Image (tube, helix red, strand yellow):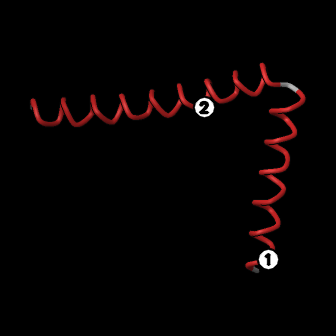
Amino acid sequence: MKWVKRLALGLVVVFALFYMITRPEDAAGAVQGAVAAVWGGVEAVGRFFSSLAAA
């Protein structure tokens, strides 16, 4: 089962490198979208705890 995870990770890395080389603008847009999604989640959790502490 370990080799399946290692193979899957290797395929993801190879695909990401191929995508970055062949379509760098689209790859940058995808990374920006992912970072924005994570940042939005962090802000939502922060607002939750702030409102919880204020109540």
Does the CB distance between marks 2 and 1 fall below 8 Å? no
Which is nearer the eye, 46 or 20?
A: 20
Which is nearer the eye, 48 or 35?
A: 35
Instruction: Count the labels in the image.
Output: 2
Count residues near mark 2 (Cα–Cα under 10 Å), then give few for <14, some for 14-19, many for 20+: few
Q: Residue pushed farthest front? A: 21
Quadrant that contains the N terminus: bottom right
Spot occupied by residue 38 in the image (x, y as percentages of width and height)? 50, 34
Which is nearer the eye, 40 or 16?
A: 16
Name the N-terminal-most of marks 2 and 1.
Answer: 1
Amino acid type of disc 1?
Trp
- The kind of secondary structure element at disc 2 is helix
9 left or right of 55 in image: right
- The kind of secondary structure element at disc 1 is helix
Q: Residue at x 80, y 24 (%)?
A: 24
Q: Which residue is mark 2?
A: 34
Q: Which residue is mark 1?
A: 3
Spot occupied by residue 19 in the image (x, y as percentages of width and height)? 84, 35
Residue 4 picture quarter: bottom right
Q: Residue at x 74, y 69 (%)?
A: 5
20 left or right of 49 in image: right
Image height of 2 relative to 37, above or below:
below
Amino acid type of disc 2?
Ala
Image height of 11 relative to 7, above or below:
above
Residue 44 picture quarter: top left
Inter-mark Cα distance, 2 to 1: 28 Å
